[in-house]
Amino acid sequence: MPEINDSQLGDYIKNILDKNKWSIRKGALQIGVSAAYLSKLINHKADSNPKPATLRKLASGLHVSPEELFELAGIKLSDTSDSDKPEYVDLKEQINDKKKIMTFEGRIIPDEDLEYMERLLRAERRTSCMDVIIVNLMKYAYDHKITVILTNHFDGHTPSASRPDTKTIVVNTNWHEEKEIPFQMAHELGHVVNGDEGTLYYSSFSNKSKYERAANMTGLDILIPIYVDITGYTFSSVSPFMEQFGIPDYLLDAVTSRFKNVYQTKEWLLRILRTGFN
């Protein structure tokens, strides 16, 4: 395989991300590669040379022609073999194949999550940003070994709930105020992360109990960095964030301070990347 011209390719991909105002994490989600790999590719790391199949994947996610990326990478299409071409797999068929067990990072994906994935792919939910945030919240749960049960079998007024002792949360995706689902999910994750006791149910008025207040704070700590990474918004976007996800007004100060902290942290990291620690 010829040597990759990673400098031109990395710069080209970075220009597309900048044009679309995508962070590396959002770009990685759009393409279907890890953020770490995309960062290496953009920054011309030696171990980031993409294979032809990866170039096709990049082209699909960035909505450009594969030929353009192949040319930038210094590869002729005639140099690729049939084995480099991607294999098309119907995810619905894979999910419905009872002889196969679907896993994510070695953990079995519950039937409820598979059902929710199908609904997302059929575009039955209204807000793509919310879909991506829910997927990231699920990944957060997997990373922290928390079981998430997404169900639409409850009526629209049955709140989401958590059982911290079993590290399990149940999210009602049929909730009557759909926009509130991401914060409900983050709130219930907060109960588990905080190690609270008993079975706990979400309420938009749940700021009187110290456990509910703490779950609200932890939920915001989980949700806001995910939201900022995906949207690229700064702390000036507090009101749109609260409106988009139905965050109760009594959490305004908490949301504002967290947006400011996330923004300042990002600015500090960018400054370090530009100038070093000196």
Image (cartoon, grey):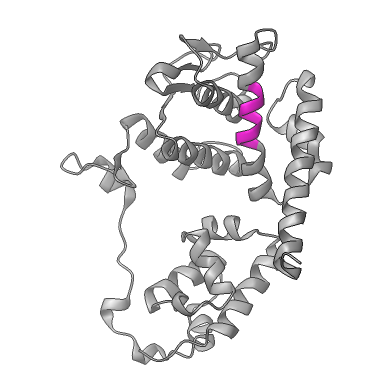
* Residue 51 percent location from the top left of the image: 39, 77
* Residue 29 percent location from the top left of the image: 52, 55
Indicate yes or no whether the magenta region holds residue 145.
no
Q: Is residue 221 left or right of residue 80?
A: right
Indicate yes or no whether the magenta region holds residue 221.
yes
Residue projecting furthest to the right: 236
Quadrant housing the N terminus: bottom left
Tell me if residue 99 comes above or below residue 181 in the rendering: below
Q: Residue at x 39, y 79 (%)?
A: 52
Quadrant housing the C terminus: bottom right
Tell me if residue 263 comes above or below residue 28 in the rendering: above
Residue 233 visible? The answer is: no
> Which quadrant of the structure image shows residue 225?
top right
Magenta span: chief secondary structure: helix
Q: Residue at x 53, y 83 (%)?
A: 6
Which span of residues is magenta-colored? 216-223
Q: Residue at x 51, y 17 (%)?
A: 160
> Which quadrant of the structure image shows residue 223?
top right
Q: Nearer the viewer, residue 151 or 213?
A: 213
* Residue 270 percent location from the top left of the image: 73, 61
Residue 71 visible? The answer is: yes
Q: Is residue 234 left or right of residue 24?
A: right
> Which quadrant of the structure image shows residue 110?
top left
Q: Is residue 167 left or right of residue 160?
A: left
